[in-house]
Image (cartoon, helix red, strand yellow):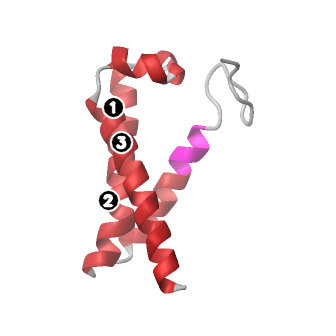
Amino acid sequence: MNAFLWALQVLLGVTFVAAGLMHAGLPRQRLLERLPWVENFSEPTVKFIGTMELAGGLGVVLPALTGIAPILTPIAATGLAVIMLGAIGGPDQPVGTLAAQ
């Protein structure tokens, strides 16, 4: 069971690190091609979201892996949950609905 949980933890971390690098590292115009939600937010906001995803992805794995401040792992997971809750709806999209694309 422990190995399964570690595998899920690493998968979650890698997914958020990849998303964070994309959101924080790519120019807004490149992001608009694949992510229509970017149009509703300023570039600094998108970069902030990407930075938080990157920090959360690293925070889900590294503290528990290294044994340094392992209390940060559940805090990072909670932060990622908050980011995902914020992704449910937006200024012109009611919470819980999908944008028609």
Rendered view: 92 above or below 63: above
Q: Quarter-wise, where is residue 30 in the image?
A: top left
Residue 76 appears anywhere in the view: no
In this image, 95 relative to 63: left or right?
Answer: right
Q: Residues within 10 Å of mark 3 (few under 14, many from 20)?
A: many
- Report the magenta residues as a range: 82-87
Q: Say what secondary structure mark 1 lies in.
A: helix
> Label 3 belongs to which residue?
20
> Label 1 belongs to which residue?
47
Residue at the spot x=29%, y=69% of the render?
Answer: 62
Task: Give how far across and how far down residue 51 sits, in percent.
Answer: 32, 42
Q: Characterize the magenta stretch by its predominant secondary structure.
A: helix
Task: Give how far across and how far down residue 50 sits, in percent.
Answer: 36, 38
Q: Which is more N-terminal, label 3 or label 1?
A: 3
> Label 2 belongs to which residue?
58
In this image, 18 relative to 98: left or right?
Answer: left
Closer to us: 96 or 45: 96
State the CA–CA distance, disc 1 to disc 3: 8 Å
